[in-house]
Image (tube, grey):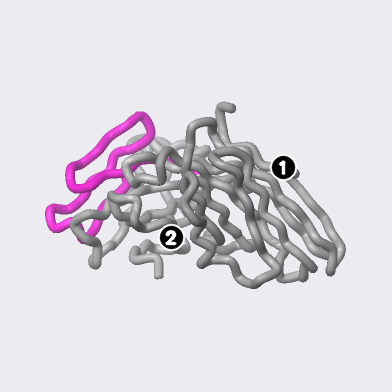
Amino acid sequence: DAKTTQPPSMDCAEGRAANLPCNHSTISGNEYVYWYRQIHSQGPQYIIHGLKNNETNEMASLIITEDRKSSTLILPHATLRDTAVYYCIVRPVSGSARQLTFGSGTQLTVLP
Amino acid sequence: GAGVSQSPSNKVTEKGKDVELRCDPISGHTALYWYRQRLGQGLEFLIYFQGNSAPDKSGLPSDRFSAERTGESVSTLTIQRTQQEDSAVYLCASSFRGRANYGYTFGSGTRLTVV
C-alpha cells in the first residue's frame, strides 16, 4: 500500500513547466511528502520534501494543499533530461516507520 | 565516499547458484535500505538497517534472502539457490539516522540476471 495516487504518465513540452500531481488523502499529521525520480537504468534520485509549507530548491518546487491531501511537484522549465519516472511518497517524521514505500509513479516524458 | 556504491553493477548467474551483492553507504549514514526492482515495476522494500538495532526484515520474500551489516558500514545481500524470478535490479539506499527530514541517497543498483 503506497498511500499515494499518481497518474501513470504525463507529457510536457521542453521549456515548459511540468506539474506532477499526487493524491495522499490519508496522510497523517506527522508524515512528510517526498518526491523522487528515477531516470532509466539509474537509482532513484531525491528531489524535494515537505510537511505543510510549500518548498523550493534548485531542482523543483513542491506545493502542498492546505488540507495536505494532495501536492504538486513543479519543474519550472522542463528539459529532455527530466524525462523520468517521478515517485511521490509519504513517510512519518519520526524514525518509527522503517521503509519508503514506492508506488508506480508517473512517467514524465519531456518532448522536444 | 561521495555516494552510495554498489557492486557488482551487473551479475549473471546460473539458476541454483548463490550470489552476494555489496553496498557501501555514505560515510556517517546510519540507515541502510535494500530494495528490489523488477523490470518495468516500482521499488519493492526488502530490508532496513538502523545503526545497531535489529534489522527490519519484513520485506524479504523468502528464506533464501538474507542480509548483513556490520555497524554503520558495508552491507551484503545474499541470495541462495537463485531462481529466475530473482532477476531484478537490487538497489541500496542510505540516509542519516533514518529520519524523514533527511533525503535518501540511492546507489545505481546491481542488475541480477538468473539464467
Mark 1: which secondary structure? strand
Point out residue A100 in the picture as x, y percentages from the top left corner. 43, 56
Q: Is residue B80 above or below residue B67?
A: below
Viewed as shown, does residue A48 lie left or right of B12? left
Q: Is residue B20 visible?
A: yes
Viewed as shown, does residue B13 lie left or right of A11? right
Instruction: Return the chain for callout 1.
Output: B
Query: Amino acid type of disc 2?
Result: Thr
Query: Amino acid type of disc 1?
Result: Ser
Residue B41 circle label: none
- Please report the bounds of the magenta region as a residue range: A45-74
Query: Where does label 2 land, which residue?
Result: A101
Point out residue A73 in the picture as x, y percentages from the top left corner. 32, 47
Query: Where does label 1 land, which residue?
Result: B7
- Front one among B65 and A38: B65
Q: Is residue B31 above or below residue B82?
A: above
Q: Are marks 1 and 2 in contact (CB under 8 Å)?
A: no
- Residue ID at (36%, 58%): A97
